[in-house]
Image (spheres, rainbow, N blue to C red):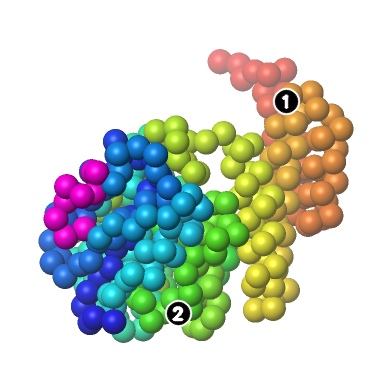
Amino acid sequence: MQAGLVSIIIPTYNRAHLLADAIRSVLAQHYPHKQLIVVDDGSQDATRQLVSGFAGVEYVYQPNQGQAAARNAGLRQCRGEYVASLDSDDIWEPDFLSSGLAQLRQRPDLGLVFLNWQASHGHNALEAFFQQKAARRRYLTQAVGDWWHLTAAQSRRLMLETCPAPSSALLLRRSAMPGGWNEQMLIADDWCLLLDIVLRQPTAVAFTLAPRWLKRVHGDNIYDGRHYVAVVQELSFHDEPLLLQRHRAQLDLAEVLIFRHRQAEHYINYAYESYKHAEKTAMLRHMATAFRMSPLATGRRIVLELANYAKTRYAKSYPPTL
């Protein structure tokens, strides 16, 4: 492991038309000590030829196995003290590495940092999460410039509540990583790695809400821009139960309930989607599952929805008079 070196993995599959921008954004980083590895996950386009045109970029080919397996193939080639994984359709700003590394070097107890992004479609899940009053009270407590520093307890709770950052946002201290990315995951391999890190040992984390990279949403993303139903089937009904199973022994009852409440919310939302498509049997099945996962959270959600419905009906029936 080379001190000060940042190893960057770019996994890619049939994205030669986007990959060059990602590579250029890494090569344009102000921080000079970096190793760039492009892992071609079985592409059938001109990816190999494209990468060969960039001097100093390492190229690894493997048969198509998915993004987590591609990241792991790159990880086996990493020589750096720090590790990052940039998706092949994303673009870092030139100070992405230097900004994140400044935090890691100032605070040896930080296991990782993550940096905010600007999405090409305008939606930003990180900012939406921290707009919630509960999230702001819980996590926006210690500021250092435009960076927020989380204690180990805050980091653990945050990662259990949500995946705060996709892979392109992360800069990891290699010594904090207990392993690689979970290849069972369909979407949440980045979330699983975060949980592996913060649940293995107390880990402080820092993040910034100042955008430092561009997430391009183009209709072929694994998560962003996809229909809710497709995402729920893969993330909520497949990946999240595996996350709970993987980490169950490390969680107390309150932490297990965080998983169950979130899954119940997804089943309620899925039931609503079924209702909109007149699939009453499916709707009842999903609501029953939500009650089984978290009776209190489901009951609370139903009461709130009924209250909102009644308020809307009342407003329509008795409009305000001038």
In the picture shown, does residue 222 fall above or below 206? above
53 magenta-colored: yes
The numbered mark at residue 203 is 2
User: Please, what secondary structure does the residue beneath circle 2 have?
Assistant: loop
Q: Which residue is mark 1?
A: 276
Amino acid type at image mark 1? Lys
Q: Is 299 located above or below residue 171 in the figure?
A: above
Is 306 located above or below residue 254 in the figure? above
Residue at image point 69% right, 73% down:
248
Image quadrant for the N terminus?
bottom left
Judge whether residue 163 can be spotted in this image. no
**Residue 103 painted magenta:** no
Q: Are marks 1 and 2 in contact (CB under 8 Å)?
A: no
Which residues make up the magenta segment?
A: 49-57
Instruction: Give percent across and percent down for residue 227.
Output: 57, 34
First along the sequence among labels 1 and 2: 2
Towards the viewer: 102 or 48: 48
Q: Residue at x 37, y 51 (%)?
A: 40
Mark number for residue 160?
A: none
Relative height, residue 309 to residue 201 (above, below)? above
Q: Secondary structure at mark 1?
A: helix
Write down the quadrant of residue 100 in the picture: bottom left
Please give the name of the residue rendered at 73% of the width and 74% of the height, measured from the top-left corner.
Answer: 253
